[in-house]
Image (cartoon, rainbow, N blue to C red):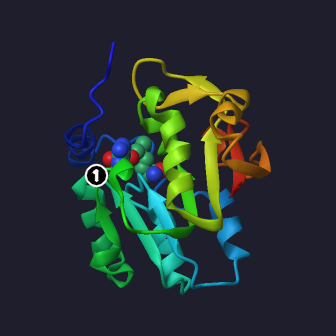
Amino acid sequence: MSHDLSAKYWDDRYLNDDFGWDLGQISPPLKDYFDQITDKNLVILIPGAGNAYEAEYLVNKGFTNVYVCDFAEQPLKNLLQRCPKIGADHLLLSDFFEIRDLKFDLIIEQTFFCAINKTLRKNYFKKVHELLNPKGKLVGLLFNDVLNKDKPPFGGSKDEYVDYFKTLFDPLVYETAHNSVKPRSGRELFIILKKI
Ligand SMILES: C[S@@+](CC[C@H](N)C(=O)[O-])C[C@H]1O[C@@H](n2cnc3c(N)ncnc32)[C@H](O)[C@@H]1O
């Protein structure tokens, strides 16, 4: 059975305080990754960003080119209120798959991939590849767990994902994250995939 995964579905969940996926803080593996980046001018995109604590963290650390994309309006409003410094023009209220005319050095994955229809998984990697500059990277977390079949979060496995990206990216890091938040411990992969 197909599930309603429209912008309205997601926006309603934010408006109804029904967002159990939201950590309320930056995801620790991403914080560690961001903390070792020296080039604060990298052009960074966080798609399916939701309340985007990762973006807020980056902007407050002095990163100058942080973009977020979400097709639900409420979390983008929340982010702008908490972190006006990001700049309203860096909030892309759009379907991720429709982003055009922008290129990024780094794209960040944090519970977006598990929220899209499973039929779009290959397209996700193709779209990330298209949006990255040469040598650009996809960095973040992917569940390595069964999870739900009929509604998000949709599960998946390490082997399954390799099939989608093996012709597009070199996996520089592709292993179980060692510093996940407790409920996700041992259940998510930390990935650094470099564009081929
Ligand atoms: C499970 S939430 C995760 C939000 C955030 N990354 C986090 O970890 O809290 C998935 C998010 O992806 C957004 N989303 C789903 N499909 C999308 C699409 N095709 N384009 C843009 N945003 C999308 C939803 O609106 C929602 O905010």
Can you give x and y, in whole percent of width and height, for residue 58 in the image?
53, 75
Residue 32 vertical position relative to residue 89 in the rendered view, above or below: above
Which residue is at a point 56% across and 27% down the rendered structure image? 155
Q: Nearer the viewer, residue 74 or 63?
A: 63
- Where is 116 relative to 4, above or below? below
Whether the residue carrying mark 1 lies under 8 Å from ligand 1 is answered with yes
Q: In the drawing, does residue 105 fall left or right of residue 177?
A: left
Query: In this figure, which residue is indicated by the disc labeled 1?
Result: 71
Q: Is residue 15 above or below residue 145?
A: below
Q: Nearer the viewer, residue 154 or 117?
A: 117
Amino acid type of the residue tagged 1 in the rendering: Phe
Please tell me whether residue 95 is drawn above or below residue 116 in the rendered image: below
Q: Quadrant of residue 94?
A: bottom left
Disc 1 is placed on an element classified as loop
Query: What residue is shown at x 50% (from left), y 43% (from top)?
Result: 124
Name the side, left or right, on which 104 lies relative to 19: right
Query: Measured from the top left, where is residue 30 in percent x and y?
Result: 64, 61
In the picture, which quadrant includes the C terminus? bottom right
* Residue at the image position 56 percent from the left and 83 percent from the top: 61
